[in-house]
């Protein structure tokens, strides 16, 4: 009867119906399930407490939200019956099929007033978010205004707001190519909305929930919970992506922001959430939450941070991978005008305990698709250079290694250290093949990501020197840390 079709608003609505009926997939739904959903929506959507919330999705001229119907509740009820029960077998159908599910459209209009001129089976902006108005023929076939829609698809779209969460005055709908994840998000939002709707109706208050988190932060936070749910359900470990739609269908200011997490980013998140990485990852995440505002005499105990900078920056991957790695894995501080930005206090001197190779190596594999052989050579070089610094106490080399930003100077630093090792009758710390594979594309042609490679080597060096206890007696070498300017980064 119902199936996911790829359209985010329809799919999230179907996921909401599925969650409402306690089913695991839309293919399990029956006509009686749709009737139960229609009964619930018909009851709550005509309640005045829902007007403000529903106007975000359906505009103020929808029957639920029409100001002119505030004193004529029977018209609200009539509108709800037409829109919510168009799937019913009693409603005649036309030969024409809808654009979403390929089902026959209803042979009736969705207006209440007799004077309303609407084509039968056609939906407009008050029925489907972000469509055009009733008399606009642009973007519709044959110059016929409105979108042909079946009663089943229309019911799903009407259920959409209950499967969303309200953030900053707009609704956030989460779509995914993994049905299990999409239903998880819809169920999470539906359960919370139903609870708060019940309280609002009991207290005769407006239903106006608003989550304190920013949308991208909330999205990642719930995604991590959802992946844990998948493990408990022992589902197949299939790659997937998610796309969130933060939208408003308001007549005065329609808007849409789209946030996408590709499958490689989600694969990385699933790895670092596993038992072998969770402890180190949680430390990095914990130190990325927004700091409380600085107020005299104010207490930090009641502050709930709306933003996690790491979660927000995940949406800039893989384009911003080098800066992401330097900030969160190498702990290079950033320069920011935001007084609540915790990244300005990062330091691999004071946070050397969370600088490790394990998580960055997975980052390289999952996010950047770096070859396994190159990753291993980078790790080995970090080990060799750490042993050299520790054995020779070469603080100048260590400082120059992470502060040189010109490739020719950086290369000379490595060559001098190599010659110094050989002059002491020790094996060279660099081999020709490993150096070329890590730092160059050809002879004397630096690789486009040589700074990234340098930072990766440095991560491994810091981890090994920390394990060797070298930093305890050489704090002075880190007094001048580089600072990243990230004011324009997400």
Image (tube, helix red, strand yellow):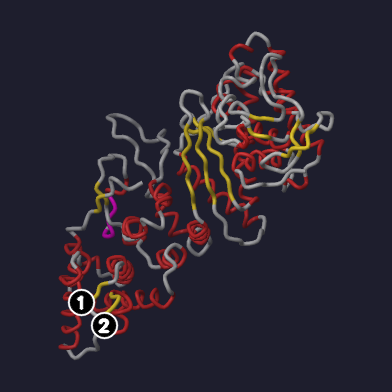
Q: Nearer the viewer, residue 20 or 135?
A: 135
Q: Is residue 346 magenta?
A: yes
Is residue 467 visible in the rendered structure shown here? Answer: no
Is residue 194 visible in the rendered structure shown here? Answer: yes
- Binning the other alpha carbons within 10 Å of mark 1 as few (below 14), some (14 to 19) or many (20 upward) gives some
- Tell me if label 1 and label 2 are in contact, CB under 8 Å: yes
Secondary-structure class at tag 1 = helix
The answer to whether 313 appears left or right of 479 in the picture is: right
Q: Nearer the viewer, residue 32 or 66?
A: 66
Secondary-structure class at tag 2 = loop
Residue 235, quarter of the rendered image:
bottom right
Q: Is residue 471 above or below residue 417?
A: above
Q: Nearer the viewer, residue 385 or 247?
A: 247
What is the x, y in percent for residue 477?
18, 64
* Residue in the image at 36% along x and 35% along y: 300
Mark 2 sits on what residue? 430
Mark 1 sits on what residue? 414
Residue most toward the top?
71
Alpha carbon separation for disc pair 1 and 2: 8 Å
What is the x, y in percent for residue 53?
56, 25
* Residue in the image at 27% along x and 66% along y: 451
Residue most toward the bottom?
425
Residue range in magenta is 345-349
Q: Is residue 478 above or below residue 307?
A: below
Q: Is residue 208 above or below residue 378?
A: above
Residue 163, quarter of the rendered image:
top right
What is the x, y in percent for residue 368?
42, 64
Q: Characterize the magenta stretch by its predominant secondary structure.
A: loop
- Binning the other alpha carbons within 10 Å of mark 2 as few (below 14), some (14 to 19) or many (20 upward) gives some
Pointer 1 or 2: first along the chain: 1
Q: Is residue 401 magenta?
A: no
Q: Nearer the viewer, residue 52 or 379?
A: 52
């Amino acid at each position: 009867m119902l199936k996911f079709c790829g359209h985010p608003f329809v799919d999230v609505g179907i996921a909401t119906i599925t969650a409402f009926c306690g089913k695991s997939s839309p293919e399990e739904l029956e006509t009686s399930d749709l009737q139960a959903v229609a009964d619930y929506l018909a009851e709550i959507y005509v309640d005045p407490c829902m007007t403000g919330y529903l106007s975000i999705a359906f505009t103020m001229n929808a029957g639920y939200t029409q100001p002119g119907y505030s004193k004529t509740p029977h018209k609200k009820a009539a509108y709800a019956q037409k829109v919510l029960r168009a799937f019913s077998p009693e409603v005649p159908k036309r030969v024409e099929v809808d654009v979403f599910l390929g089902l026959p459209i209803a042979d009736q209009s969705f207006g209440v007033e007799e004077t309303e001129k609407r084509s039968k089976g056609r939906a407009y902006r008050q029925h489907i978010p972000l469509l055009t108005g009733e008399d606009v023929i642009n973007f519709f076939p044959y110059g016929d205004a409105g979108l042909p829609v079946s009663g089943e698809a229309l019911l799903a779209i009407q259920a959409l707001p209950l499967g969303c969460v309200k953030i900053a005055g707009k609704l956030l709908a989460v779509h995914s190519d993994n049905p299990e994840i999409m239903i998880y998000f819809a169920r999470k939002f539906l359960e919370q909305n139903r609870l708060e709707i019940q309280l609002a109706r009991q207290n005769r208050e407006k239903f106006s929930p608003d989550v304190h988190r920013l949308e991208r932060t909330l999205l990642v936070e719930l995604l991590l919970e959802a992946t844990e749910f998948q493990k408990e359900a022992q589902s197949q470990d299939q790659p997937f992506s998610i796309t969130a739609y933060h939208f408003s269908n308001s007549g005065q200011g329609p808007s849409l922001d789209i946030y996408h997490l590709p499958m490689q980013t989600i694969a990385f998140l699933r790895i670092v959430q596993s038992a072998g990485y969770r402890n180190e990852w949680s430390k990095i995440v914990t130190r990325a939450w927004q700091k409380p505002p600085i107020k005299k005499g104010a207490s930090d105990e009641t502050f709930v941070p709306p933003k996690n900078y790491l979660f927000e920056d995940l949406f800039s991957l893989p384009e911003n991978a080098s800066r992401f790695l330097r900030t969160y894995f190498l702990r290079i501080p950033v320069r920011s005008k935001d007084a609540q930005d915790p990244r300005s206090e990062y330091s691999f001197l004071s946070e050397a305990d969370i600088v490790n190779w394990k998580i960055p190596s997975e980052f390289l594999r999952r996010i950047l698709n770096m070859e396994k052989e190159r990753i291993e050579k980078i790790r080995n070089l970090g080990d060799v250079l750490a042993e050299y610094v520790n054995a020779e106490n070469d603080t100048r080399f260590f400082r120059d290694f992470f502060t040189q930003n010109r490739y020719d100077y950086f290369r000379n630093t490595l060559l001098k250290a190599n010659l110094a090792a050989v002059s002491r009758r020790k094996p060279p710390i660099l081999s020709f093949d490993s150096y070329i594979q890590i730092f160059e594309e050809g002879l004397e042609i630096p690789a486009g990501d040589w700074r990234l490679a340098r930072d990766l080597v440095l991560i491994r060096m810091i981890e090994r020197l920390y394990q060797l206890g070298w930093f305890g007696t050489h704090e002075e070498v880190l007094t001048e840390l580089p600072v990243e300017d990230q004011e324009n980064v997400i």
